[in-house]
Image (spheres, rainbow, N blue to C red):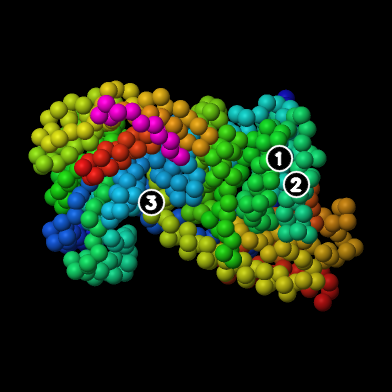
């Protein structure tokens, strides 16, 4: 019974979501990768909001076959309760008629099984895609690392020629993958040369300070977060800022 | 023989539970176990992980990356910014985290200051590490608050840390921001670590706000904060918790954690993932329920004001009433003007089959008190309080 309900729910949410996206035509910024998606997502959302743009991001783990449509439709999950799902099912189509739909959707795309990416991309068509990193996380459901990387390869292959791919140049697999992209590619990194590269990273009491190099310019920055992933997220935010402003 | 363990004792809470297990009709308000079962969403997350075959192997020593990442996100929601890769360690319950912390930051002979009454097992961990627990009494008359002067007086050249629980177990006290900042000043002045066990932080009542020193970036090289999934998500049996601190300290704690357990149980780490992803609603539900039970147990204690006085708990799920007069003065030993809490708890268990924890378990200042856990169901609380009422009536020959 549960399996049938989940199947019907999946189809229902998918087509309502596609209709909502078709009507409102938001710019979709997709974030994929094995780790650090939440931090890139937060940085992008903040960047867009600081530019006065209307953006919404998917909360926590809403990045799967059911979670992604719910995030786009701004609905919560009914989890395992039929009664909790009922108001969500009723409310979902109302998004078609809403006037205040965000101009930008910042969406994490989760892939933990072969074919997940294909399914998610049958719902959303990202204009900008960020791949944060590829590690062995979630490898257990794939036959090997190549099959896992294949998910990201598929994502890159689906990018329109007018789109933008933003990738991590510190990851050798991603460097190789991005070479096959048909669209424009902007890279970020800490260790390796990249379009946007952070250097001279120093921890301070209240966070980290560093300089970043892009387009023959050098700027310095301070962030109130700890860990290199936040520097990467900062660089992604900067790329988005420069791209959107342009 | 047994040089290291000879001064250790089985926690009085566990001793009481062992004793209580001998009585068939006992109601236990002793051990801090919530009455709820682990929420369904957490169990489903674990089922999913089992089906995927991902729980049989060790995780990385500090824990599953996806869990630590989510912990970082949830900490940021509470204004605490820590790097999941280097500053967050998932532990096998908070007591393992505490043990790893104490072993990492102290050397034998060091002293650790503990405001008391507080959680009984802190003492055993310190003794195991060869440290000396130095108790600083909380002020009962001021709602079990800190008295900074007493902390300062307790500091010696051997003092390494101040270790507290917020909200405090067993008193349910919430230490406010002002008190904690002053404590932090003291720690800075004497170069001490601050260990904060925030295991009950989700259960605060009457619109109280909980503040943690881990929110202050300038203190991150001093503060080690622990949180457990046990109470908030009704997962005491899963043994999963986490700690976070500055990378320099975390690196040292990690070595001890590795030597103690290699990693927290992976199946429980998936449970913790489910808790952070989907358990928020359940935590709110539990908190509302505990507030109701707090009010119930307080109302029942009010009826026994002849025998008990108490400070209304602001958080956690314990009340710590003081026995103002023994049930039968002739048969009860007194210690320093207080009712002997061990004798009382054993007599209550024997006569009424209600298990409570004697206050002495929580430090010398706890003598003359008992800890009542209102994490149990309303039905259990009412039945236990009925029995306590009868116990007093019978003892007084009424």
Residue A62 showing in the rendered view: no
In the depicted view, which residue is nearer to us: B175 or B18? B175
- Quarter-of-image position of residue A92: bottom left
Q: Residue at 52% across / 62% down in the picture?
A: B287
* Badge nearest the viewer, 1 or 3: 1
The C terminus of chain A sits in image quarter: top left
Q: Are marks 2 and 3 on the same chain?
A: yes
Marks 2 and 3, the one that precedes in the sequence? 2
Q: Disc number at residue A222?
A: none
The chain that hosts pointer 3 is B
Q: Secondary structure at mark 2?
A: helix
Would residue B80 appear left or right of B57 to someone viewing this image? right
Q: Disc number at residue B277?
A: 3
Q: Pointer 2: what residue?
A: B148
At which x and y percent is residue B397? 84, 74
As drawn, the residue found furthest toward the top would be A192
The chain that hosts pointer 2 is B
Marks 1 and 2, the one that precedes in the sequence? 2
Query: In this picture, which residue range is highlighted in magenta?
Result: A214-229
Marks 1 and 3, the one that precedes in the sequence? 1
What is the spatial separation of the Cα atoms under label 2 and label 3, in whole angstroms?
Answer: 39 Å
Q: Residue at 68% across / 38% down in the picture?
A: B187
């Amino acid at each position: 019974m549960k399996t049938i309900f989940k199947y019907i729910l999946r189809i229902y949410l998918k087509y309502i979501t596609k209709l909502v996206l078709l009507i409102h035509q938001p710019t979709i910024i997709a974030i994929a990768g094995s780790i650090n998606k939440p931090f890139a997502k937060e940085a992008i959302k903040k960047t867009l909001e600081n530019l006065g743009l209307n953006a919404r991001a998917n909360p926590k783990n809403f990045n799967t076959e059911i979670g992604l449509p719910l995030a786009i439709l701004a609905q919560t999950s009914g989890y395992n309760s039929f009664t909790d799902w009922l108001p969500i099912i009723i409310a979902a189509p109302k998004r078609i008629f809403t006037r205040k739909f965000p101009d930008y959707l910042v969406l994490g795309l989760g892939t933990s099984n072969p074919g997940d990416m294909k399914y998610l991309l049958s719902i959303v068509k990202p204009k900008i895609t960020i791949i944060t990193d590829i590690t062995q996380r979630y490898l257990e459901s794939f036959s090997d690392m190549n099959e896992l990387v294949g998910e990201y390869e598929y994502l890159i292959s689906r990018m329109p020629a007018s789109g933008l791919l933003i990738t991590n140049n510190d990851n050798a697999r991603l460097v190789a993958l991005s070479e096959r992209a048909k669209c424009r590619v902007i890279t970020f990194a800490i260790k390796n040369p990249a379009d946007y590269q952070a250097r001279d990273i120093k921890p301070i009491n209240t966070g980290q300070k560093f300089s970043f190099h892009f387009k023959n310019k050098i700027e310095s920055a301070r962030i109130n977060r700890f860990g290199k992933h936040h520097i990467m997220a900062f660089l992604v935010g900067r790329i988005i800022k420069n791209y959107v402003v342009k | 023989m047994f040089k290291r363990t000879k001064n250790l004792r089985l926690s009085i809470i566990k001793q009481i539970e062992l004793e209580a297990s001998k009585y068939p009709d006992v109601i236990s308000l002793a051990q801090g176990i919530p009455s709820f079962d682990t929420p369904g969403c957490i169990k489903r997350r674990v089922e999913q992980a089992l089906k995927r075959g991902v729980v049989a192997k060790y995780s990385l020593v500090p824990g599953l990356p996806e869990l630590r990442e989510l912990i970082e996100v949830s900490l940021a929601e509470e204004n605490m910014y820590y790097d999941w890769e280097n500053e967050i360690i998932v532990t096998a319950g908070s007591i393992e985290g505490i043990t790893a912390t104490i072993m990492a930051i102290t050397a034998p002979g060091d002293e650790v200051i503990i405001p008391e009454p507080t959680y009984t097992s802190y003492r055993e961990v310190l003794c195991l590490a060869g440290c000396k627990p130095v108790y600083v009494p909380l002020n009962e008359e001021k709602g079990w608050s800190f008295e900074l002067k007493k902390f300062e007086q307790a500091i010696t050249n051997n003092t390494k840390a101040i270790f507290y629980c917020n909200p405090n177990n067993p008193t349910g006290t919430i230490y406010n921001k002002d008190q904690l900042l002053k404590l932090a000043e003291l720690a800075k002045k004497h170069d001490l670590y601050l260990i904060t066990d925030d295991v009950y932080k989700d259960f605060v009542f009457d619109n109280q706000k909980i503040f943690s020193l881990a929110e202050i970036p300038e203190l991150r090289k001093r503060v080690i904060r622990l949180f457990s999934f046990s109470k908030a998500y009704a997962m005491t049996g899963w043994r999963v918790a986490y700690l976070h601190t500055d990378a320099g300290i975390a690196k040292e704690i990690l070595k001890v954690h590795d030597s103690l357990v290699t990693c927290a149980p992976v199946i429980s780490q998936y449970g913790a993932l489910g808790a952070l992803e989907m358990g928020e609603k359940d935590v709110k539900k539990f908190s509302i329920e505990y507030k109701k039970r707090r009010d119930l147990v307080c109302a029942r204690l009010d009826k026994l004001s002849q025998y008990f006085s108490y400070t209304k708990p602001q958080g956690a799920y314990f009340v710590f009433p003081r026995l103002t007069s023994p049930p039968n003065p002739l048969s009860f030993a007194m210690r320093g003007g207080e009712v002997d809490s061990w004798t009382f708890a054993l007599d209550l268990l024997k006569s009424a089959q209600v298990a409570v924890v004697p206050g002495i378990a929580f430090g010398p200042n706890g003598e003359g008190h008992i800890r009542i856990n209102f994490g149990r169901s309303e039905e259990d609380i009412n039945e236990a309080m009925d029995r306590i009422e009868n116990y007093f009536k019978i003892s007084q020959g009424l």
